[in-house]
Amino acid sequence: MLAKRIIPCLDIKDGRTVKGVNFVNLRDAGDPVELGAAYSEKGADELVFLDITATHEKRKTMSELARSIARHLNIPFTIGGGITSIDDADAMLAAGADKVSINSAAVRRPGLIDELALNFGNQFVVLAVDARQIDGEWIVHLNGGRIATEIRLFDWVKEAESRGAGEILFTSMDHDGTKAGFALEATARISELLSIPVIASGGAGSMEHFYDVFTTGKADAGLAASIFHFNEIAIPDLKGYLKEKDVVVR
Amino acid sequence: MIAVIDYNAGNVQSVLFALERLGAPAILTGDHAQIRAAEKVIFPGVGEASTTMHFLRERGLDEVIKSLTQPTLGICVGMQLLCAHSEENDTPCLGVIPQQVKRFIPVHGEKVPHMGWNSLSRCADEIFTPELSGEYVYYVHSYYVEEGPYTSALSEYTLPFSAGLHKDNFYATQFHVEKSGKVGEKILRNFLSL
């Protein structure tokens, strides 16, 4: 049986993880590779690295990071943050990345999805989308949720799929940081609308929230950051809990 | 020395890193003599079947692969291309293993590609040792090899399909053995110690 995936997300700035990490037994918790390896050891199914560095040398630092992760980790990983062209993506692939995630750049220029899918295959392209509800309508936002667009979430993910995205990483800005649970209805609607996998993000605060997003939310994977970083939920415990509730996990 | 066949398709770097982690010396090469002389050969793959077959034929690598006598491991599309024919753009493949490659057809709304961790069963050769049954490996694919006489391990997605193949000196994994955690490392190590 295909297992539901648990995915920790690491924010990286200047080669270091940004959010404080409360892990014991780690020599250097700011080192993305060491932290990634610790998660892999604990049973994370995949990792997402978001590089939020803003420099002119960005492609070079990101590809160095990707290379170092690929060299040391034996599970799949996605890298994102500032990939806007085929050349950016090609550098990540050459460095050993399994997937790239694109977000605002794809909204600004949707053809980027087609180009990446054509050149590197659909499986390489994760379309990340940040959205929140405005007057009852889910609206796509740019730049980490700061800028509203006029694009409707469900229209956008459908278009992204038809252009060749291999997965959707959906973050609800309304839920992100609340620890009150994922956006179940919107996640389920995306999952039903599309035939590619959906990664749910934003709102995880308890193990039950993961159960809910895999059942009611029909998500293929659940992503979270702080609850894993601060050890509020340990991945082995989460997997044990899900197994007990008959959710298939690795 | 392990030769990893360089044919411009997908993520060969991951395979090289996986070998490096296991301490196995490897070279990435498209050179016929180097491939023929290697102790073992790995034929990786991410890509589309017809384009890849075209690329192999243009460089004469199709004949080289078919004539290999040392232990050879096909990964993902590499496994599919070892078969007789793929439904992906109706592509005649290398024909080393007489099995067919078909596209997944959803039965209960399953998503295609089949992406993520899935479990192994009926592990039955030197690289798929029996204790690996029940363990999880990482897949990304839309096409599969049906179960047949050369199936060395099974997984299930819409139907039971070949997780692995084995015929003579040719071994293959449909999943990304280089990305399958400790289980993948065990399978790679089994191949390396053949």
Image: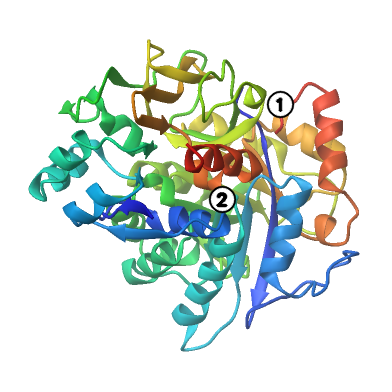
In the image, taking residue B42 as reference, residue A167 lies left or right, namely right
What's under tag 2, amino acid-wise? Answer: Pro
Q: Tell which subunit mark 2 falls on.
A: A
Q: Tell which subunit mark 1 falls on.
A: A
- Image quadrant where residue B142 sits: top left
Q: Looking at the picture, how far across and down is residue B32, in whole percent?
A: 17, 52
- The residue sitting at 46% across, 81% down in the picture is A60
What's under tag 1, amino acid-wise? Answer: Val
The 10 Å Cα crowd at callout 1, few under 14, some 14 to 19, many 20 or more, is some
The 10 Å Cα crowd at callout 2, few under 14, some 14 to 19, many 20 or more, is many
Does label 2 lie on the same chain as label 1?
A: yes
**Colour option used:** rainbow
* Viewer can see residue A121: yes
Which residue is labeled 1 in the image?
A: A248
Q: Nearer the viewer, mark 1 or mark 2?
A: 2
B117 lies above or below B134: below
A13 lies above or below A24: below
Q: Looking at the picture, how far across and down is residue B153, in whole percent?
A: 51, 21
Q: Which mark is residue A76?
A: 2
| Element carrying mark 2 | loop
- Image quadrant where residue B93 sits: top left
> Looking at this view, is A16 or A207 the one in front?
A16
